[in-house]
Amino acid sequence: MVTRARAALLALLCAVFVALGPSVAHAYQVLLWPQLPDGYYGWRTTVTSIVLIPDKPGRLQYQWDGTMGEWSDYTGPVFALEGRRTLFVREVDDIGRAEDPVSLRVKVDYQSIRNKGNYRPYAVPSQGATGTGVSLSVTVNPAAGARIKRLGGQNRFETAVEISRNGFPSSSAVVLATGADFADALSAAGLAGSHAAPILLTQPGVLPLPVSDEITRLGARNVIIVGGTKAVSPGVESGLRARGFVVTRIGGRNRYATAAMIAEEILRREGSSAARTAYVARGDAFPDALAVSPFAYAGKRPLLLVQPTALPDATRAAFLELGVRNAVIAGGKGAVSDQVEAKIRADVGSVSRVAGKDRYYTASEAAQHGVESGLGHYAVVGLATGRLYPDALCGGAALGKKRGVLLLVPGDTLGMAAQSALDLHMPDVRYVEVYGGEQAVSPAVFLSVQQLARF
């Protein structure tokens, strides 16, 4: 079928010819089939083949997306991969000398619907005469580009359940934390990663029914409660035991001690290598810790908490007992002061800081840091409001499982930090998950992301 299409194109000269290369002497021609994009905003929705024609004798090689890895010899039509893709082509002479590569960009989304044009002739007056016009109606393609979905419920507990359902087909364990505060759930990201488990939220005194049902759906046998009895009551714990779950609790006298105890459990499960690097964030505010939580999950790393101007005794003891050699501070100097940084450096040796001018830019910087550390990629991007914590608490774990990144938005707008990150990395984005209902992340933000994905 491809050969027939190619022959027809060559014979009828009805393909689109694209001249590439820095000069005529080194130019190539490209035959695209279909000739023109058949999807909305320039997206191609059918199998797209590319035929390369050199203007002079020589051996052609190609590769996708400029990975600069192995080049493939061109022997026949090349089929475009899905997504925003760049085909690099070069010519190699008889003695192996390669010309500078040239490129061609295509946008392909095989799962999206095609445009459907409905043509209707009608009469139009033209300087006293009657002519013929055409009315065209087009079905907009909402699926082109990255797949975007909202994961939100009626409240924080149901949102956590929706995130779990979307990201975890099953799990032998769940991590359960209070939904009335943020510290315990954030500190537990690395522990959840160690169990490959979701994080779910509960009311302090009552386990919400949707959460109970989700634990059953997951097929979990183990429930790990993080936080003391004020955070998650003994009644919730005993109710789970009565249903046959194996329940363990990790809780200290305050959030700093609880985070240290969670880190010790990660060390026990994963060994000393997992604790060599620890994330550090202020314990009295949530945004900075949220930003690194996907990478704590993916790397099964501790996330320890400090005060802006003081290093709690429990946190310092954890640095020493865990054998931490590298600490990554999330947040600027207003969040974790120079004095606290100096004390941490004295205990662990190497300290780096991931920070922006505000919580939104810090999240963007943290995302880039996670990608450069090999713990994340932009194929999956999560968006959550930076004004409230509940939605992203569980979203961080879900992103960590997929090795995605988390960006924070003001809620009513996308914000420059998230928009700049998406603009830069949208060619790599395949899925965007918006955490929370429309009051948390507005429809305008959702629409803005859709528009970015289409272009």
Image (cartoon, rainbow, N blue to C red):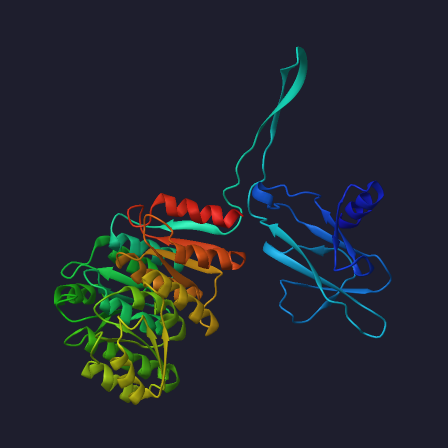
Position above or below: 257 against 234: below
**Residue 118, image x, y percentages:** 60, 27
Q: Residue furthest top?
A: 128
Is 26 placed left or right of 357 in the picture?
Answer: right
Residue at figure coordinates x 71%, y 69% from the top left: 71
Closer to the camera in the image, 188 or 29: 29
Residue drawn at (65%, 70%), measured in percent from left and top?
A: 68
Expressed as whole percent of the image width and height from the top left, the position of residue 60 reads 78, 64
331 up-or-down from 436: above or below = below
Task: Say left or right for 431 vs 330.
Answer: right
- Is residue 171 something that shows in the picture? no
Count the marks.
0
Depth check: give the residue in front, 89 or 261: 89
Vertical placement of 363 versus 37: above or below?
below
Look at the picture and state if 181 lies above or below 269. Answer: above
Residue 190 horizontal side relative to residue 73, left or right: left
Examine the rendering and report whether any part of residue 3 can be seen. yes
Location of residue 95 (image quadrant): bottom right
**Residue 444 image offset from top left, x and y in percent:** 37, 44
Q: Which of 248 and 139 is in front in this view?
A: 139
Q: Image quadrant of residue 285?
A: bottom left
Q: Residue 319, image x and y in percent?
A: 28, 85
The residue positioned farthest toward the front in the image shown: 127
